[in-house]
């Protein structure tokens, strides 16, 4: 009891800061969503019935889900190599994983634009080599958005995965080998289930992060593949429709909250 | 399926960087033998087991299984069962699923697996715990699951790294009996690691004693206890009294008193505490040394006595409590006696 209260005391200032920085503005947004332009739940009704908004929300979740699956899978492979590699190779990997952190989202989005656009590097080369006769549309659509987002998010997923792989007791894998289990069986039946917590953590991190993406979809989606963050921005800053923008924000927050709760239940379930 | 195997180690050495965890270990583990590796912490017991199982390769030397070189065979092909120090259970599987795993690897039929798992749960006294994950089991229960998992699939060689360390005395005794019975029934080759001298002596057909990565002696329990190869082995296997022997005109003396010694050798005379006796006055015949009783510890059936001789030697005696005179208290002057047929020369 005293132990717990001492912890609370230590956490106090941080909690205070978080409350001020997140909770207060969020409550403000919540108030707008039920008061602007007039009091009531009308804005939620609009957000959930308006076909355009619904299609954008649906697209957002779809793209985020695809991005999460691709990013976590790629990060799993990277983390596996990173954790298991010889020291020299490991250093090289660390560089590859860390360098993207130092480059801004904006730079990276424009980088992909230069690479993927109709007159970009890939199309020009492929055409000059005769692989393609017509340029391939790889930006200003969902494909471009997904590529850009995955590229940004993979490094974030690597860390929770690598941590769960490092914490794994090597002897458990040895025990399985000693019983004659093949490497494939050990991977699917022992290694993967034992790193499940890392996978779920990485997936949640990537998904939540992806939901709030603004710059990448705006540049690589080119206004044709608008996602939720851009929609909220447009509602609040371009059309003075604060109530609707706020209602969409609250819907996103609640979704994230539900996902978090689900994840906690799932990872809590591995103990027992 | 089960065919007990003979394993030969030839000049096995293992370096970790500059540190020699094992040096020049050579011996043969017989078919169906129960060999115990005994030694202080850090003496290389676990290292030797991991080399046997194939998880690590020796830096030098060779391992042979029934005469075939085993050095390059990976652990999954060796198929030796191993119970790890610290259990190494699969944390995401229940006790039953843990035990079933190696059976599934062997592609046994579902009915066979179910029957074997149930039999192992029963054998290990784990009834009612089969559906629990390792984190929901006590240390002793986890250890028994690990044992069950290794026994279930009947490997030709079983390597057990301190499999009873987390068990209380009663359970430990039961599991020792169980393991001994299984060994008799299965005829599998067992290599067992323990810190516990009496466990080693009780279970094994032979005991291999390690110190600092070197094999000190390998012999049947009676022999390592009664005829240790060197002072380390003698002291490691339990309390021992060491009496320096002088020769006076060709006759042996201890602390200036003439003694009769029939055991061969020239070094000091070593006597186990249980082979010494106590007298309250100087005996008429036989070997005896006058001493001061420092301490007396009642241990139930036995009493342990700490003595200091007039010459300043510390002695330990272990007597049946029934043989200790009730009048004896610390501070008494007594005589330590022994039969000249007992003991050995170091
Ligand atoms: N992977 C390793 N790297 C470096 N040193 C190691 C490694 N494994 C073991 N050692 C060293 O080798 C020595 C023998 O270790 P080992 O685990 O075989 O001892 P042990 O006899 O099993 O001891 P215990 O009874 O405490 O389990 C120890 O000094 C240990 O520090
Ligand atoms: Mg050990």
Image (tube, coloured by chain):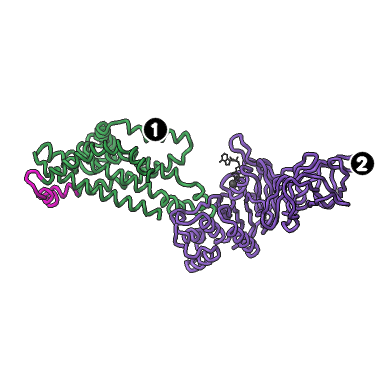
Q: Is residue A85 left or right of residue B166?
A: left
Marks 1 and 2 belong to one chain: no
Write down the residue under mark 1: A95
Residue at 27%, 41% in the rendered image = A209
Chain identifier, purple in the render:
B
Chief secondary structure of the magenta span? helix
Residue A11 seen in the figure: yes
Circle 2 marks a residue in which chain? B
Q: Quadrant of residue A82?
A: top left
Residue furthest to the left in view is A38
Query: CA separation, marks 1 and 2?
Result: 80 Å
Q: Nearer the viewer, residue B121 or B237?
A: B237
Q: Please, what secondary structure does the residue beneath circle 1 have?
A: helix
Q: Nearer the viewer, residue B244 or B106?
A: B244
Q: Which residue range is magenta in the image?
A: A35-57
Circle 1 marks a residue in which chain? A
In the picture, the quarter occupied by the C terminus of chain B is top right
Write down the residue under mark 2: B250
Place of residue B185 in the rendered image (x, y in percent of width and height, measured from the top left): 64, 65
Q: Please, what secondary structure does the residue beneath circle 2 have?
A: loop
Indicate which disc residue B80 carries: none
Q: Quadrant of residue A157?
A: top left
- Ligand 1 is within 8 Å of the C-beta of the residue at disc 1: no
Residue furthest to the right in view is B249
Residue at 12%, 36% in the rendered image = A237
Chain identifier, green in the render:
A
Q: Please tell me how crowded label 1 is: few (under 14), some (14-19), or many (20+) other residues with Cα within 10 Å.
A: few
Does residue B119 sit above or below B301 in this rendering?
below
């Amino acid at each position: 009891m005293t132990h717990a209260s001492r912890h609370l005391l230590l956490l106090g200032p941080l909690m205070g800061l978080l409350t001020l920085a997140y909770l207060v503005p969020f409550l403000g947004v919540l108030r707008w969503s039920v008061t602007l332009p007039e009091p009531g739940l009308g804005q939620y009704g609009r957000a959930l019935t308006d076909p355009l908004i619904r299609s954008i929300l649906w697209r957002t979740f779809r793209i985020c889900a695809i991005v999460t699956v691709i990013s976590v899978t790629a990060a799993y492979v990277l983390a596996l190599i990173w954790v298991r590699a010889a020291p020299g190779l490991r250093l090289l990997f660390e560089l590859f994983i860390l360098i993207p952190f130092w480059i801004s989202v904006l730079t990276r989005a424009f980088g992909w634009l230069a690479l993927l656009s109709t007159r970009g590097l890939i199309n020009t080369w492929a055409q000059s080599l005769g692989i393609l006769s017509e340029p391939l549309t790889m930006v200003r659509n969902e494909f471009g958005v997904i590529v850009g987002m995955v590229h940004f998010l993979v490094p974030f997923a690597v860390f929770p995965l690598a941590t769960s792989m490092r914490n794994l007791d090597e002897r458990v894998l040895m025990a399985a080998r000693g019983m004659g289990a093949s490497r494939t069986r050990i991977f699917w039946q022992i290694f993967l289930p034992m790193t499940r917590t890392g996978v779920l953590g990485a997936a949640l991190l990537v998904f939540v992060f992806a939901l709030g993406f603004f710059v990448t979809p705006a540049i690589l989606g080119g206004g044709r593949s608008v996602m939720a963050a851009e929609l909220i921005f447009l509602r609040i800053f371009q059309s003075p429709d604060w109530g609707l923008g706020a209602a969409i924000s609250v819907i996103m927050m609640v979704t994230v909250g539900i996902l978090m709760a689900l994840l906690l239940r799932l990872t809590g379930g591995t103990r027992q | 399926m089960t065919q007990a195997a003979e394993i030969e180690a030839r000049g096995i050495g293992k370096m970790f960087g500059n540190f020699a965890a094992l040096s020049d270990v050579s011996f043969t583990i017989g078919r169906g033998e129960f060999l115990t590796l005994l030694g202080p912490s850090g003496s290389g017991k676990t290292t030797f087991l991991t080399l046997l199982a194939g998880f690590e390769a020796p830096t030098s030397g060779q391992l042979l299984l029934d005469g075939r070189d085993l050095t390059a065979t990976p652990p999954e092909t060796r198929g030796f069962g191993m119970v790890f120090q610290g259990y190494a259970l699969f944390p995401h599987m229940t006790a039953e699923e843990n035990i079933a795993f190696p059976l599934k690897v062997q592609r046994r039929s579902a009915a066979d697996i179910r029957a074997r798992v149930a039999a192992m749960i029963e054998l290990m006294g784990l009834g009612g715990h089969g559906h629990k994950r390792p984190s929901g089991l006590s240390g002793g229960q986890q250890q028994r699951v690990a044992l069950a998992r290794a026994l279930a699939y009947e490997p030709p060689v079983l390597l057990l790294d301190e499999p009873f360390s987390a068990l209380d005395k009663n359970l430990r005794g039961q599991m020792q009996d169980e393991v001994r019975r299984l060994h008799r029934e299965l005829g599998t080759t067992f290599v067992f690691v323990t810190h516990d001298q009496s466990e080693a002596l009780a279970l094994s057909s032979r005991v291999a004693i390690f110190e600092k990565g070197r094999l000190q002696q390998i012999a049947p329990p009676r022999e390592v206890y009664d005829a240790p190869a060197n002072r380390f082995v003698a002291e490691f296997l339990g309390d021992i009294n060491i009496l320096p022997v002088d020769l006076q005109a060709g006759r042996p003396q201890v602390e200036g008193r003439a003694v009769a010694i029939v055991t061969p050798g020239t070094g000091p005379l070593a006597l186990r505490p249980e082979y010494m006796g106590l007298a309250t006055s100087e005996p008429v015949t036989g070997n005896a040394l006058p001493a001061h009783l420092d301490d007396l510890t009642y241990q139930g059936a036995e009493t342990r006595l700490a003595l200091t001789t007039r010459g300043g030697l510390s002695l330990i005696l272990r007597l049946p409590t029934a043989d200790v005179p009730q009048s004896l208290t610390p501070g008494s002057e007594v005589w330590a006696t022994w039969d000249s047929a007992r003991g050995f020369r170091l």
